[in-house]
Image (cartoon, grey):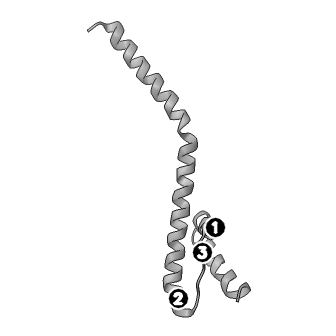
């Protein structure tokens, strides 16, 4: 095989990887956000499953799942406090 063709193909592949790697960064950020929202919804599900015994129920929607996903356990605790104290 001609070395010029091999070098040309390898250079083209490297260029393609560099271009495609930079264009997928926003999708990676969006994907991480969706994963965090799903984890927040899972946290709220467990809170509702175990909190149902004491009468605690936090609705699972996009806003509460986002708060729980982005803030983690402190966010879930904050939502539980808001539900028990303010929205009683």
Is residue 47 placed above or below 17 in the rendered structure? below
Residue at the spot x=54%, y=75% of the render?
44
**Callout 2: SS:** helix
Is residue 28 placed above or below 10 in the rendered structure? below
Residue 23 screen position, x and y as percent: 55, 35
Q: Earlier in the sequence, mark 1 or mark 3?
A: 1
What separation in Å lies between label 1 and label 3 (alpha carbons)?
A: 8 Å
Q: Residue furthest bottom?
A: 54
Residue at the spot x=53%, y=80% of the render?
47
- The answer to whether residue 32 is left or right of residue 79 is left
What separation in Å lies between label 2 and label 1 (alpha carbons)?
A: 20 Å
**Callout 3: SS:** helix
Residue at the spot x=55%, y=68% of the render?
40
In the drawing, what numbered circle is on residue 52? 2
In the drawing, what numbered circle is on residue 13? none
Give the residue pinned by disc 1: 67
- The answer to whether residue 14 is left or right of residue 34 is left
What is the quadrant of residue 71 in the picture? bottom right
Residue 64 screen position, x and y as percent: 63, 70
Disc 2 crowd, CA 10 A, few/some/many (<14, 14-19, 20+): few
Q: Earlier in the sequence, mark 2 or mark 3?
A: 2
Taking depth in this image into account, of 61 and 35 the one nearest to the observer is 61
Q: Earlier in the sequence, mark 2 or mark 1?
A: 2
What separation in Å lies between label 2 and label 3 (alpha carbons)?
A: 15 Å
Residue 27 screen position, x and y as percent: 54, 44
Give the residue pinned by disc 3: 76
**Callout 1: SS:** helix
Assess whether mark 3 and mark 1 are in contact (beta carbons under 8 angstroms).
Answer: no
């Amino acid at each position: 095989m001609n070395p010029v063709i091999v070098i040309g193909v390898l250079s083209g592949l490297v260029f393609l990887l560099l271009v495609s790697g930079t264009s997928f960064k926003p999708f990676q950020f969006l994907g991480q956000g969706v994963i965090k929202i799903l984890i927040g919804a899972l946290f709220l599900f467990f809170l509702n499953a175990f909190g149902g015994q004491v009468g605690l129920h936090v609705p699972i929607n996009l806003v509460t799942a986002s708060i729980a996903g982005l803030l983690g356990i402190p966010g879930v605790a904050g939502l539980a406090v808001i539900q028990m104290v303010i929205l009683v």
